[in-house]
Amino acid sequence: MRSGSDYLASLKDTRRVYVDGEPVEDVAHHPAFAPIARTIAGLFDTAADPASGMTRPHPETGAAVNRLFTTPRSREDLTAFREAATTWARRTHGWVGRSPDHVGAFFAAFAAHPEAFAGGSGEHDFAANITAYHKRIVEEDLYLSYAIIPPQVSRATTAHAWDGELVQVGVAEERADGIVVRGAQMLATGGAVADEIFVSCIKPLGPEDSDFALSFAVPVGAEGLKLYCRRPYAPAASSAYDYPLTTRFDETDALLVFDDVFIPWERLFVYRDVAGLRRQFFDTGAHVLGNWQAQTRFAVKLQFLAGLARKVAAVNGVDKFPGVVEKLGELASLASLVESAVLAAEYTAGPDEQGLWRPGARAVYGAMGLQAELYPRVLAVLRDLVGGGVLQVPSSIADMTNPETRADIDRYVHSPNAEAEERVKLFKLAWDAVGSEFAGRHHQYELFYAGAPFVVKGYAFRNYGFEGPLADVDTFLSSYGLEPTPA
């Protein structure tokens, strides 16, 4: 297992990451990416510490590896997976949505079902490719991001109908040693500071879209690959005191542009196979395992926001007011729902035909189906509790360090339970959670984390198991009719 310093050193490569029209020469030290790179480095250091409980012996070599990248083969493995995912989530308080364990979980499930990748293109063994690549992830401790959504050129049609050749990433050329791909794909969260990117398409495609029905892994530094990042928030943050979340956890989202990028056959997992795209996510259990990791992270984030609200109420001296207790109770209920769903998914888990222990889909997708409603409600309650307190704070840390202004801050911006420095610090944190650009990005992120509402609720519908409730209703309906009710 590599250390955080090993990870940071690996970022010095040929990757082409663009911000404000300029290429970034060294992402590990650029102000837009250095904070999140340091955070990810901290995750690797935590995982490599034997005391963290995140390591397990490699099944073949016995070497210590990150259990979050390995396939859970027992209930004990699944419990240890959740505990390890929770350990990493607590390091970021749930604010890093695409930590290395997210895509790592997808590949752990992919590798358990190589048969889902079999077939396809003649002499190429994609089943062997997925097994070998997963072994690389485990043995090299790789951080993968993914880009599995087409660019939003048209949401009414699929890529074959778009004007222009290969707007969505697709096959430009087939060669004896691999393929050349051209086009774009989104939304590679963390891609600028990842080792490699898994590129595929989760949007349903049609038979005419075979050129775009691909899954492959590509190094971020591959020749011809460019990453165009959205506005980074960390460089504009005046200090960690003013923006404590922004300056640690600002993941970068990026559009990937493939300018004739060569992909060797051994890095391909699905090739011109529309049905294969769906098999990889759903037949393998990857979708439910990866999203269980995501709900574990989400539960930690909601717990953090609930704790923040409780702290604000205490500092304001209103935590005994019945109306405030009601709001804090609502936050406790919302956070508990997601936490309970994570545990319920573990309780209802079981092995599939290949021995992968899958979390209970009913609980995972039930929580996901409400994520876009739970998160805005949590923010609304927190906004209500902080009120104008997040607006009436000093403009920056400079007001706290200038003796000329500090005296006024100390006198007028304090609470009975907190001196000015601690009160301002708390309300700066609250603003970074509900009102800053970073907060706005997270609001949007959680709203559309798993797709549009009809997509997410569709997962919940298909995995609930309506057969039993329907049978109960039919049984009850058959128990009475037009005959008179007995006296």
Image (spheres, rainbow, N blue to C red):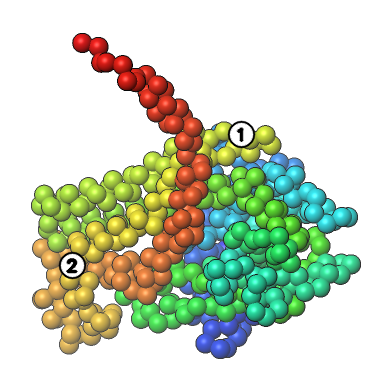
> What residue did someone put label 1 on?
351
Q: Helix, strand, or loop for circle 2? A: helix
The quadrant holding residue 151 is: bottom right
Percent of width and height locating residue 107: 65, 52
Residue 319 left/right relative to 244: left
Q: Residue at x 52, y 87 (%)?
A: 20
**Which amino acid type is marked by label 1?**
Pro
Q: CA distance from mark 2 to mark 1?
A: 49 Å
Q: Which residue is mark 2?
A: 387
Label 2 crowding class (10 Å Cα cut-off): few <14, some 14-19, many 20+? few
The answer to whether 355 is drawn above or below residue 151 in the figure is above
Side of 303 relative to 449 (left or right): left
Percent coordinates x, y for residue 145 in the rendering: 59, 63
In the depicted structure, whether residue 178 falls above or below residue 56: below
Q: Nearer the viewer, residue 481 or 398?
A: 481
Question: Which quadrant holds the C terminus?
Answer: top left
* Residue at the image position 80 percent from the left and 54 percent from the top: 120
Instruction: State the image coordinates of residue 118 (x, y, percent, origin top left).
Output: 78, 48
**Image quadrant where residue 121 sits:** bottom right
